[in-house]
């Protein structure tokens, strides 16, 4: 029905993300998370929040496992929020570094006026 949901559904299965965790982090009712996962209709706002949350949890779990070799406790919501925020901050820092490098390259190539 909703083929565009398949990548998110795959992340939920691959990383074994509990529906209750998705609901808690995204501030969406657990029943709406289940409706989303089961290809039923959910509001656009809930869909966006669920998808963003799943992507962020999956990214955090991937980084955490890559760095520590361990799986984080996805039922520990407060620490999971801290981890997700740390990944967001890291991504922002990386984007700033990239923007500065591009600006410096433009300047040294005479592109800046």
Image: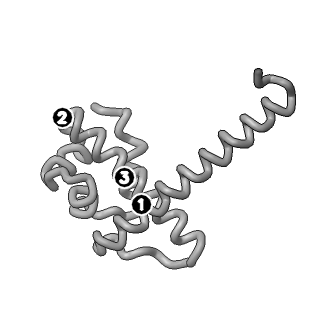
- Residue under numbered circle 3: 54
Q: Is residue 27 left or right of residue 61?
A: left
Vertical position of residue 83 compared to residue 101: above or below: below
Front: mark 1 or 3: 1
At mark 3, the secondary structure is helix
Q: State which tag comes first along the sequence, 3 or 2.
A: 2
Vertical position of residue 46 compared to residue 57: above or below: above
Quarter of the picture containing the N terminus is top left
Q: Nearer the viewer, residue 98 or 38?
A: 98
Q: Where on the picture, by quarter, is residue 47? A: top left
Gap between marks 1 and 3, in whole Å? 14 Å
Crowding at dot 2, Cα within 10 Å, few <14 / some 14-19 / many 20+, comes out as few
Task: Look at the numbered discs 1 and 3 and tell me whether their residues touch, using CB distance below 8 Å.
Answer: no
Residue beneath the point at 30% across and 39% down = 48
Q: Is residue 88 left or right of residue 67?
A: left
At mark 2, the secondary structure is loop
Residue beneath the point at 49% across and 56% down = 89
Task: Look at the numbered discs 3 and 2 and tell me whether their residues touch, using CB distance below 8 Å.
Answer: no
Residue beneath the point at 60% across and 45% down = 95
Crowding at dot 1, Cα within 10 Å, few <14 / some 14-19 / many 20+, comes out as some
- x, y percent for residue 23: 22, 56
Gap between marks 1 and 2, in whole Å? 25 Å
Residue beneath the point at 41% across and 61% down = 84
Q: Nearer the viewer, residue 33 or 13?
A: 33
Q: State which tag comes first along the sequence, 1 or 3.
A: 3
- Residue under numbered circle 1: 85
Front: mark 1 or 2: 1
């Amino acid at each position: 029905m909703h083929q565009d949901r398949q990548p998110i559904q795959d992340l939920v299965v691959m990383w074994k993300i509990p529906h209750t965790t998705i609901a808690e982090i995204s501030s969406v009712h657990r029943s709406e998370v289940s409706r989303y996962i089961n290809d039923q209709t959910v509001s656009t706002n809930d869909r966006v929040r669920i998808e963003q949350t799943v992507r962020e949890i999956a990214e955090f779990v991937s980084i955490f496992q890559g760095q520590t070799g361990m799986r984080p406790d996805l039922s520990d919501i407060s620490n999971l929020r801290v981890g997700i925020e740390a990944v967001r901050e890291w991504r922002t820092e990386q984007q700033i570094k990239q923007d500065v490098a591009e600006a410096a390259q433009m300047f040294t190539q005479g592109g800046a006026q």
